[in-house]
Each structure stands twice: as structure tokens, then as C-alpha cells.
Amino acid sequence: MSIGKTTVWVNGQIIGKNENGYLPFEFDITDALTPGEPALIVVRAYDAQDHGEQLAGKQIGWYERTSGIWQSVYLEPRNETHIAQCHITPDIDNASATFAVKVGGNHREDAEVGNRPNHIQKPLLLRWNCDGLTGSVEVSGDHDTQWTINIPPEQLRLWDVDTPNLYDVTLELLAETNTVIDRIFTYFGMRKVSIAKAPGGDYQYIYLNNRPIYLLGALNQSFNPEGVYTFLTDEAIRRDIERAKEFGFNFLRLHIKVDEPRLYYWADKLGLLFMCDIPNFGDYTEKAKARSEQTLRGNIARDYNHPSIISWCNFNETWGLGGREYKEMHERQEWVREMYHLAKSLDTTRLIEDNSPCLYDHVETDINSWHFYINDYERAKEHIANVVEETYPGSAFNYAGGNVQSDAPLINSEYGGISAGAGDKDVSWCFKYLTNELRLHPKICGYIYTELQDIEWEHNGFMNYDRSIKAFGYDYLDINTLDFIAIDYPPGTTVRPGEKIKADIYTSHFSHKTITGATLHWQLDTMSATGDITRGCVSGSVDIPFPQYQVENVHQLELTMPDVHPAVGTLHVWVTDGTGSVVARNFINFEHVEGDCIPETNPAVEPSDSGLVGGASEYDSGDSRISINYAPGDVSKSSWDEPARDEHLFSAEGSGYVEYEIALPEGLGTTNPTEMELIFEASSSNGGARQTEPEKHPSDVTISVNGVEIETIRIPDCPADARGVLSYIHGQPGNYGYLYRVKVDPPLVFEREADTLTVRYEVKADAAAKGGFALYGARMGRYPTGPHLLIHQN
């Protein structure tokens, strides 16, 4: 298979040409060969730079183009009369499977092919073996030969994602002398895809094997850094499927690419579902339309037997169809409808989607899907609720050209908080709260998160482009799971002591196991400024229903916030069954502060004229310790040119220094400090919020006090994930740091008559690791503490 226009020569003779880069093609080279002589085979793959009429998917204006031969090439001996195609259609309701076989080659008794007489005489027989079930059937002329096998009850094994049972098939073509002239090996799965009413609901769900299935999906664009479109090894293909399952996904949308057949093979073997997109063209022309139809037909023909494929999607986001103007282009809408019906006629076993829309422009479809990219909790909540409210038979919402909704099941087919051009940012926080919002609504029976892995400049995957795994700061299997507990409350908020909160709790139970004796538990844990965890500040439990294949509001949780501050709180919510096993869990976060100190915003702070932090002394009982706080944004001097800076954060890349001149409390010079500590949360800095990953970004930071170097610390990284709670609550990406305590010997730095003390953080130009520096305030990062100097006195 090759992209663009392909020409094949053998010994200087043109054997054939092909213009489709996504479908397999073959040429018979027999007549160009000389017995006993070597042959020279030449393949030219010409990829025109104008992709307007060529199906190219995300190669158009998005990612690296692929040219040349991008899938496996085979040279094989084969009889002129041979098995050309075998489609197997399972019927689990009747425990049977229907075979439809095409025999290729001209097998008339008097036929000649070129200068080669056809010596294969009628009648021809097809002999089959399906996991020990055997039989034969006579080939029926030039038409498909069809027969149905019945599978005994003791041998009936259904295929699904948990038990991907496959039936191995050997198919032989025999001449009248019972000579085997062709033999193929294939397989199929006994599985059924259908649509039916949701249990207890008046809306439709997607069913697999006559049971509702909640689609936990991810977009899979199937690029890789080594081969772009081409996988270099079979193991790499397998690992993508394995990783998707490890992340909790049971479903992938293969995005506008007809992929290597081994990808579907491993999905069949390991148990993963696919929606398969047809690649798009750029310009709407008759040639482009013809190529699209050819690819639709060929894709279905080639991949018909894969049980992992449950849906075909003909178009994506109206690309090539006219964009926003498509809604007024009725002729194009009718052609899209024709392609929907064509796909239905070619494959009655799968669901067909006309167009996966971002512009609300379905025409006729088996799946009512929509896309959104929103990185704001309140906006996302309102958006999802509106989509659900507008979804009902007869609604014009999400449809174009006067068409209206049927009762097609509702899924989200692309969502995320970090869209394609948003940069390299953490996705853990938005994945959790967006998925939680989707799971609150019974009408929604699945989602497709964007995406499985990063691609080139698009960074929103569970994995990086090189397939290294990102850290989320929580177990993503708690969120990306069939049995889920949803919390109808913001993912992170600021609370005061004594404040009361109310949150509705929903169960979403879509595994096939029956759960009885369900109990809802909750527990509020808090983390102090020193990083110490206090568990069970508030806790409780209540028995709840946990209905299967339904979403249900089961309890309203009411809590009074404890008198704990400053702190970061985590409200854990989980469900156990009658045996005490945990079947679902979730959490939300709080920032616990004192009284009315909650600011509406975090305005940028300009340094005062003196550069001092005033009035920032706190005394503990006995006046034996003094804590002097300073704000990261209140800088007295810095060599960095353009640091990121506000009241609660200072961040700069590379080498440089930042100084803070700290005002000492009056009278401190008459005391005799015995010990001093600098306590702060810090990280390195990469200038963004790249999600925590295996590759680290260290920085060597030297701390000085009053010009005396105290210590050089190796800060390992600049992490960003859901643990950066305070950053997210205050509208920043989830950057956070590590909590450090640096001891300072008072005689080295303390001047008894001094009014101020100068602290410097420096990444030296000759440091081994020049990864920049970020300093977090009490309301930014992970820990509820700002940088401060702790002085112990006699």
C-alpha cells in the first residue's frame, strides 16, 4: 500500500497503476517473468503536493505528510483460480455464522488467461474447518458462494472486550480431483452490535451482545515519531492496544486513517472496540467524491471480519464538505446521506455515522455525536447540560438542512480541555472534571477523549508522542471506568471554617457484574502547610442503590467544613459492595483558608519602592519562634529579563537569580536566634505547564542569605498535574513544586542591627542543570504555604 499515485514495472514492463493510498492493491506479474531468470521490480509512489482531491486525512495542513510505500508488500505464488474474499457474518441470536466467499480468476472450463490455459475444471469445492466444525460447498458460478454454519451451544463463545474469543477458520478451494489449489486462514468473532432502549429510559443506548455498553473511548490518530503513518514493528502496534486498555479505555476512534490491518488484529485478539473514520479530502469535486466512495467500499470489504470494529464514520467535522457553509449546501448534504445509506447496505452488522460534527450538522446517522473543547468547569457544565436538554426525537439541534434527530444514541465523539493548538499542558485536571460531567447524564452512553497519545505539536494525550506515559496525580482507572461515582460539584473550590457544602452523588454502573449491598462512603483529608496529612476530618457512610446500566442520583452529601487552615483538602467518595470491596471512587479538592481572606482575583503585584514585604511577622506561643513571610512576586532584584510573575508565583527559565529583601521585626536584633530555616515550595521552570512525565527537567539552585551561600539543591523537575490543586483553583495550569526546608546558621548571616535580610535563589551560568526556577506562594502550587523564614529564639 502506498500514498499517492503508484506505478509498478517488472523487467521494464508496466504491470499496473493505482491512485488510492489507503486501500490494498495487487498486480499479477506472471506474464512479465522469464522462467529461471531474475526479475527487476520497480515501484514508483508519486505523492502530489496538491492534496485537494486526494484522501489524506490529517496529512492536510496538520502533521507530517507520508509519501511512498507505507504498509507491507507481499510477493506470493497463487493459483489463477483462488479465494479472493471471505466475509463472515455472525448471528449470536441464532448461534450461527454466514460465510460469503468470492472466488477470483476466470474458472470457466474453456477459459484462457493471457497465454496460460486455465486447467482448473468445474466443479470447484470450498472446504471449511471452523474450530473443528467442518463441511464443504460447491462454488456457485461467478457469484458469491454462501453458506451458514450452526454452532452447537457447547461451542458458542461470544467475543467482547473482556473475553475476546475468536474462531479460527481454514478455507480450502479444491478442483474436481480433490486437489487443493488454494488455502487461506482467517478468523471471526461471534458478536452483535445493536441499538435499543436504555434500561429504565426512553432514550437509546448502544448494545454489544444484547447488553448495554458504555463506550470509554479515546481518539487514536495512529501516528508515531519513527514512521509517521507506518509502524516499524508489530510489537509497537500491540503496545498501543495494550496501553489503551491499561488506561481503562474499551474503545478507540481511529481518526481519518485506514490503518495497518495488524492494528485491528491486535484489537481483535486483546479485546478493544473501534470506530473507523474514512479519510477526508480537501476539495469537494467529483473526483474527490469518487475516491471517497471507493475508499468506503474498499475499507468495509477489507476489514469486514474484524469483530473489534463496531462503527464506520464517513466524514469528520465536514472537512472537505464546505465547513460552516455546509449547513446551506443541500446537494452536499444529500450526497452525505447517500454515503450513509451506501455504508448501511454494504455492512448491516455495524453502526454508521454520517459525519462526526463540531458544527452541529448531522443529516442522517445511527449515532448522534458532538464535539467540544472547553477548559472551564462552569462553561463545560452548562454546555453539556444544554446538549442533553436539546437531544430528543424531532429536535433540530445538532442537525442541518431541515433534518431532525431520530432516537439515535447520544455520545460525545471528541472532547477535552486542551485543544490542538493550546500547547504542552497538563490534561489530568480537565480530563477528570469533564469526564465527571459527562457521567452525570443518563442520555450520554459514551465518550471519546482527545486523545490517546500526543502527535507532533498537539499535546493532549495520555501518552507523549514517544509513548512514554504521563503522570496524572491520581489513578485514572478511578475516572475512566465502567462503574463510576460522579460528584455534582466543582473540582476545586475555596472554603472557610464552618462553611456548609452540598453535593449530589450519582452512580453510573455499566459493568456486567451485579452489585448488591452498596454503601457510599466519604472522608475529608487535609494537608497542612508542612505537608502533613490529617485523615478523616469529616467522614460518614450511607447505604445506596447501585442500579445496573443506569445513571441515578443516589444521595445529597452535606458537609460542614472543619476549622482547619491553611490546608488543602481532598474529599474522597467511594462505594463498596456487600463484601466490602471498593467498586467505584472519586474525589474533589478544597483550599481551606481563614475567615474572609478569599480574594476575587490574583492581580499582578508590582514591587514596592522599597522592595520590602511589610507587616508579615507571626509569633507562636511563648514568642520562641518567628515566621516571616514574603510573596514570590515581591521581588527586590532579578537578573531574569521576563519572568512570569504575580503575587503567588515567580517563574523563570534557564540561568539567573532572584532576590527578596525581607523586613525583620522590630527588636529582633536584641535577641539571639539559635536556628533559622528557609521554607519554600519550588520547582524548576520550563516556561509552561507540561504534564509530569518520565523525562525530567532538573535545575541546580543555590540559596544565599545576606550574600553567604547556604546550600545548592537539585530540584528534580517542574511537575504539572492534578496535584497542583491551588494553581488550578486560582485559574492557573497545575504547576507545583517540592517542599524544601533549608537550615541557616544564624552567626553566618545575622547582623544584629540589620532591619532587613536578603535571600537569593540562583541558577548559576555554570550549573550542571540550568532548568530555571519557580517559587510558589501560599495560594499556588501544591502546598498551602508561601516562602518564609522561620527563626527560633532563646
Image (spheres, rainbow, N blue to C red):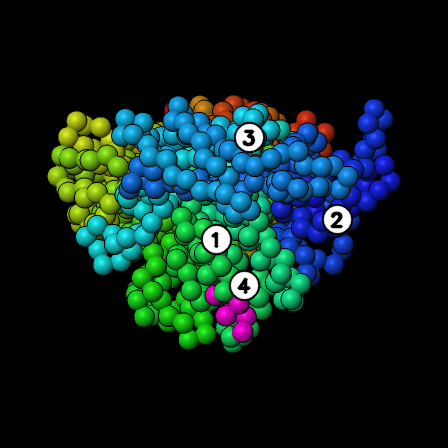
Above or below 113: residue 291: below
Classed neighbour count for the residue bearing mark 4: other residues with Cα under 10 Å, few (<14), some (14–19), many (≥20)? many
Classed neighbour count for the residue bearing mark 1: other residues with Cα under 10 Å, few (<14), some (14–19), many (≥20)? some
Disc 4 target residue:
318
Classed neighbour count for the residue bearing mark 2: other residues with Cα under 10 Å, few (<14), some (14–19), many (≥20)? some
State which tag comes first along the sequence, 3 or 2.
2
Q: Amino acid at mark 4?
A: Thr
Disc 1 target residue:
346
Q: Amino acid at mark 3?
A: Glu
Out of 644 and 46, give the one closest to the viewer.
46
Instruction: List x then y, in percent, for residue 225.
Output: 65, 37
Above or below 518: residue 356: below
Above or below 82: residue 556: below
**Label at residue 17:** 2
On whether residue 336 falls in the magenta region, the answer is yes
Disc 3 target residue:
176
State which tag comes first along the sequence, 4 or 3.
3
In space, the residues marked 4 and 2 are separated at their CA atoms by: 30 Å
In space, the residues marked 1 and 3 are separated at their CA atoms by: 33 Å
On whether residue 221 falls in the magenta region, the answer is no
Q: Nearer the viewer, mark 1 or mark 3?
A: 3
The span picked out in magenta is: 331-337
